[in-house]
Image (tube, rainbow, N blue to C red):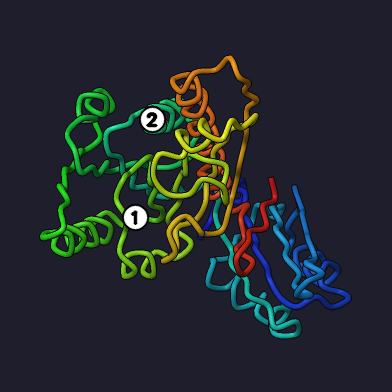
Amino acid sequence: MYNSNKKLILIISCLDRPGIIASVSNFLFKNKFNILESSQFKDTKNNKFFMRVCFTNININKNKSFKKLNADFHKVAKKYNMNFNFFDISKKQKVLVMVSKFGHCLNNILYQWKTGALNCDIPLIVSNHKDMKDVVKPYKIKYSILKINKKNKAVQEKKLSELIKKNNIDLVVLARYMQVLSPKICKLLEGKIINIHHSFLPSFKGARPYNQAFQQGVKIIGATAHYVTNKLDEGQIIEQDVARVNHTKTLENFIAIGRDIESLVLTRAINWHLEHRIIINENRTVVFN
């Protein structure tokens, strides 16, 4: 059961047809729900329709279980062959943060979490180095070190999978975790791993992107938050941002500016994921922000 004061989210994707918005609205109205926010988008390239609805129960004397809500909505979904999910936005998702030696993104995530700006639980930080252990210590979050090399990678990833399962992790965040995850992990958590790439993708992929940008004399630098897939740095892009630079900036300036952008972009992407504002659309995303 859910409390009548809680906000609920309905996410929908299907082929576009007339009447979808009306059918969803009528269902919610007849079941004594009040719509607080509604966003929709039609992709003209594949004729797919996407919708996010935030609503609450206005009948304080009657609350449906999620099981009953799903069953009742199935009649609407079947008509349009919809993929759909209901979410209780007040239920905190469990986030596993992974980091290596650079702590700027981790610091921002922990600050946003501590102040309540990120509505989630962070039961665990995983790293392949001990560098960030003292940073995490004041937050009283468990810090697990899984050192990675070519010989032990499979064993350590098995331990990682066990930690994810044991802690009921909903989302994995790679906060400058400088190891490539195996296809098995990527498949297991498809659509549930967010990475921050220290470049404005798709340019300057791979290692040392700021060095590449500096050598090319670019006039803007940026960062990209994206879902992780089997293809390195080619997952569905969630958010990007940039800053202008010029010939007076040194490589150190590039890196400092870039790290600020990375922290902001990653936090936005995490927040939108937690609020169920992102729908994967083939190799792209629909973001209702």
Q: Which residue is mark 1?
A: 169
Cα separation, mark 2 vs mark 1, equals 17 Å
| Residue at image coords 46%, 39% | 209
Residue 222 relative to residue 143: left or right: right
Tell me the tag on residue 116.
none
The percent position of residue 95, horizontal first and vertical second, equals: 38, 47
Q: Residues within 10 Å of mark 1 (few under 14, many from 20)?
A: many
Q: Answer with the quarter of the image where residue 239 lies.
A: top right
Whether 225 is drawn above or below 63: the answer is above
Whether 99 is drawn above or below 32: the answer is above
**Residue closer to the observer: 266 or 73:** 266
Q: Quadrant of the C terminus?
A: top right
**Residue closer to the observer: 155 or 178:** 178
| Residue at image coords 72%, 52% | 58
Amino acid type of disc 2?
Leu
| Residue at image coords 34%, 55% | 169
The percent position of residue 22, horizontal first and vertical second, equals: 86, 68
The percent position of residue 186, horizontal first and vertical second, equals: 38, 65
Q: Residues within 10 Å of mark 2 (few under 14, many from 20)?
A: some
Q: Which element is circle 2 on?
A: helix
**Residue at the top extreme of this rendering:** 248
**Residue closer to the observer: 164 or 78:** 164
Pointer 2 or 1: first along the chain: 2
Tell me the tag on residue 110.
2
Res. 145 in view: yes
**Residue closer to the observer: 21 or 285:** 285
| Residue at image coords 50%, 24% | 254
Amino acid type of disc 1?
Ile
